[in-house]
Image (tube, grey):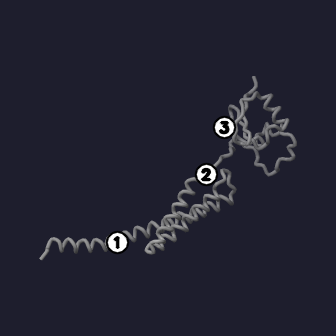
Amino acid sequence: MDSLWYYTVGRTEQRGPVEESEFFSLIRSGQIAPTELVWTQGMPAWIPLQNHPMLRSLIPNEATLTSAAPAPDSRQQEIALPTFDGWLAFIGIASIIGGALLVLTCVGIPIGVLMIFAGSAALSAKNALSDPHPTPEQLAVGHAKLRTFFILTGVVLILKLFSFAVLFLNLSDALVAAFAEMSNPF
């Protein structure tokens, strides 16, 4: 009995099971692109058709494949990284709006400006990391923007804690004086 094979169309839509003889015919006729993912029982993970040592020879016009394709490795699998588009957009926009509101108070200008810059960094990171198969350059830019966001957010947090401590110390002196005055009305 032939093995049953599965393959993707557009690397997203899964097809199969297909008997091995029909699967080989689909490859030979070019109906399955070399970059599509394939899998059959016994394989640890889905891999691109062009990386499968046995199937690679069935691909028509193999010379058209890029010679830079990595050597086939049964342990190799393509991993799509999760994207955080929604969350990074939300955090970026919320930071920008919060920063703008703080700037409008005039008292919160330093913290507000830092929040606006942090929000812009989050949106830039979102744009750089929106591809589920990012290039090393996209990853480098995205991680640099995330680093900037986290540094600015940390500085904002430290400034808020410092402001709270100063406010608390000032209010505590005023509260002690008010309680002292209330306990001794004469």
* Image quadrant in which the C terminus is located: bottom left
Which percent across, then down, holds residue 11?
71, 42
Q: Residue at x 78, y 49 (%)?
A: 69
- Amino acid on which the number 1 mark rests in the picture: Leu
Residue behind mark 2:
83
Looking at the image, residue 59 sits to the left or right of residue 84; the answer is right
Residue behind mark 1:
167
Which percent across, then down, holds residue 111?
47, 70
User: Callout 1: 10 Å neighbours few (<14), some, many (20+)?
Assistant: few
* Image quadrant in which the N terminus is located: top right
Mark earlier in primary sequence (2, 3) = 3
Using the image, tell me which numbered label, if any, was put on residue 44.
3
Task: Between label 1 and label 2, give the one nearer the viewer.
Answer: 1
Mark earlier in primary sequence (1, 2) = 2
Which percent across, then down, holds residue 88?
56, 57
Using the image, tell me which numbered label, if any, was put on residue 114.
none
How far is the residue under mark 2 from the one under mark 3? 24 Å
Q: Quadrant of residue 2?
A: top right
Residue contact between numbered discs 2 and 3, judged by CB atoms under 8 Å:
no
Looking at the image, residue 1 sits to the left or right of residue 100; the answer is right
